[in-house]
Amino acid sequence: MLQKIDHWIDQTLIDFKEERQSCARFTEKFSEYYTEEFLSKSYFVVVDNIPKPRFPELYQAGLGDFVDMEVAGITYKDTYFIKTPFAADISLHFHELVHVHQWSLLGAETFIKRYISEIQTYGYNDAPLETMAYSLQAKFIDNYAPTDVLSYVQNHL
Ligand SMILES: [Zn+2]
């Protein structure tokens, strides 16, 4: 199933390649958190409907609620998808970029495996890959302590 999801992601990224935008535009806004190099190789796509792999295997694995959950954004590898009403929500962009880095550090198969197992074990709200993204997002919103997100994620994975 991991490979099936991985292939679906690759095809989805190809399908949306023309519509993706570079995150380099956030270089100034995120200068205390992300490097320009990282942002320039990360992308986002604004969509009306978030693409999801609705495979029967995922429902059988008890992940139906998660797959069907209404989300404002989702990250697949170096690209995240964000719903139109949230396109200007800068902290959501920030959150999804944490996931871009997690994908990159773990590699696709490990990320998918770990994310699924965390959802099954802890539920979405307490999944460590999510709580890491939410806590960093909160730091950004508070604008209290500039954080090297790339190192932080690397040290806390
Ligand atoms: Zn998240």
Image (cartoon, rainbow, N blue to C red):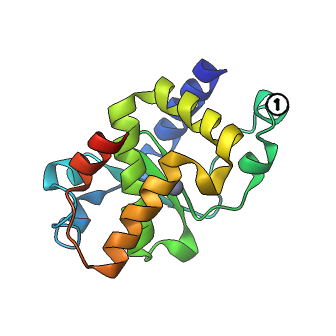
124 vs 145, left or right, is right
> Residue 133 falls in which quadrant of the image?
bottom left
Assess disc 1: are there few (<14), some (14-19) or many (≥20) residues with their C-alpha within 10 Å of its C-alpha.
few
How many numbered circles are shown? 1
| Residue toward you, 84 or 138 | 138
Kind of element beneath mark 1 = helix
- The percent coordinates of residue 114 (x first, y second) are 54, 32
Q: Quick check: 3 above or below 70? A: above
| Residue toward you, 35 or 135 | 135
> Residue 138 falls in which quadrant of the image?
bottom left
| Residue toward you, 71 or 32 | 32
The amino acid on which the numbered mark 1 sits, given as a three-letter code, is: Pro
Residue at (72% x, 49% y) in the render: 66
Residue at (20% x, 69% y) in the render: 146
Residue at (55% x, 38% y) in the render: 12
- The percent coordinates of residue 56 (x first, y second) are 82, 30
Residue at (65% x, 59% y) in the render: 49
- Indicate the quadrant containing the N terminus: top left, top right, bottom left or bottom right: top right
